[in-house]
Image (cartoon, rainbow, N blue to C red):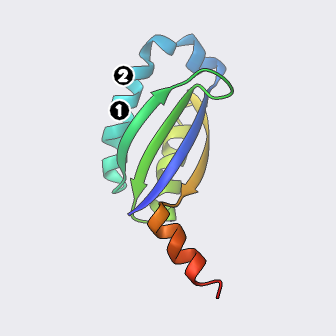
Amino acid sequence: MATYIVLTNFTDQGVRTAKDTTKRSDAVKEQAKKFGVTVKEFFWTLGSYDVVGIFEAPDDASMTALGLAIGSGGNVRTQTMRAFSREEMNGVLAKLV
């Protein structure tokens, strides 16, 4: 399974209903299962992003589909990054020689 870090910002709609953000995270966990994606953790953060999520997905297409489904709710905008573990990065680096 690939790991993804999702940086999230509330939209105007999301801020107006911020009191429901933890409930929405529970809904995302359930929704993710439909795409074969697992939510590892959510963190509500200070600074440039409102929420950071850690996900595991079988492939980019599954994660992209989930991201589109989350975005269609209108509460957040997301930026998704593929993350590599140390072991995975060592595999990438081995291909350089």
Quarter of image, res 22: top left
Q: In the picture, which quadrant includes the C terminus?
A: bottom right
Q: Nearer the viewer, residue 49 or 10?
A: 49
Q: Position of residue 29 (x, y in %)?
A: 34, 39
Alpha-carbon span between mark 1 and mark 2 = 6 Å
Residue 27 is marked as 1
**Percent x, y of residue 85:** 47, 60
Residue linked to disc 2: 23
Would you say 22 lies left or right of 67 here?
left
Label 1 environment density (alpha carbons within 10 Å; few <14, some 14–19, many ≥20) = few
Marks 2 and 1: in contact by CB < 8 Å?
Answer: yes
Residue 73 drawn above or below residue 33? above
Residue 42 placement (x, y as % from top left): 43, 33
| 60 is higher (above) or lower (below) than 21 | below
- The relative height of residue 66 versus residue 24 in the rendered view (above or below) is below
For this orientation, the residue located farthest to the bottom is: 97
From this view, report whether residue 4 is shown above or below residue 95: above
Q: Position of residue 67 (x, y in %)?
A: 52, 47
As helix, strand or loop, the secondary structure at mark 1 comes to helix
Q: Quadrant of residue 41?
A: top left
Give the left or right position of residue 71, taking residue 31 as reference. right
Location of the N terminus (image quadrant) = bottom left
| Amino acid at pointer 1 | Ala
Question: Which is nearer the eye, 88 or 80?
Answer: 88
Count neighbours of disc 2 (C-alpha within 10 A) and say few if under 14, some if 14 to 19, many if 20 or more. Answer: few
**Image point (55%, 38%), residue name:** 72
Which amino acid lies under the numbered mark 2 shown in the image of this protein? Lys
- Tag 2, which secondary structure? helix
